[in-house]
Amino acid sequence: NNNSAYESLNSIGIDLVRNDSLRQQISLVYEVRYPKVDATQEILFTHIFDHLYPALRTNLKTVSPREMTVPVNLEKLRQNNGFAEDLYMTIFI
């Protein structure tokens, strides 16, 4: 996120925005919503790199680069509860 315009407005004085509702919404976006998005993104990246990516490398093989990946052993993968949980958690996040 690029917060420079908001930081500039804040340093000059957010009271320049005369419309109370608009001023509150601007503050809400930059002070509450963007930090939540950043935190969620960090959780997702950490989960992907720590859990999902290693599971994908172990259980899938690339048939053709950037086009197709297939299970190493489909039946074994279907029984792999940890792999399923990693996928569910990624979707949930």
Image (spheres, rainbow, N blue to C red):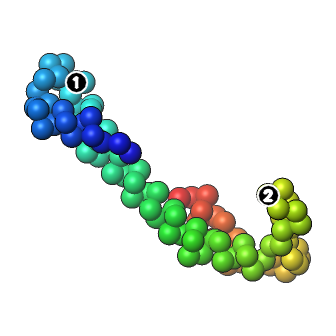
Q: Which residue is mark 2?
A: 66
Q: Can you see residue 85?
A: no
Residue 68: image location, x then y, percent: 85, 60
Q: Which residue is mark 1?
A: 21
- Residue pictured at 78% horizontal, 77% vertical: 59
Residue 15: image location, x then y, percent: 11, 27
Q: Which mark is residue 4?
A: none
Quadrant of the image containing the N terminus: top left
- Relative placement, left or right, of 25 versus 79 is left
- Residue pictured at 12% horizontal, 38% vertical: 11
- Type of residue at label 2? Arg
Q: Residues within 10 Å of mark 1 (few under 14, many from 20)?
A: few
Foreground: 91 or 26?
A: 26
Compared with 38, 81 (above or below) is: below
Q: CA distance from mark 2 to mark 1?
A: 47 Å
- Relative placement, left or right, of 30 versus 66 is left
Compared with 5, 84 (above or below) is: below
Q: How many marks?
A: 2
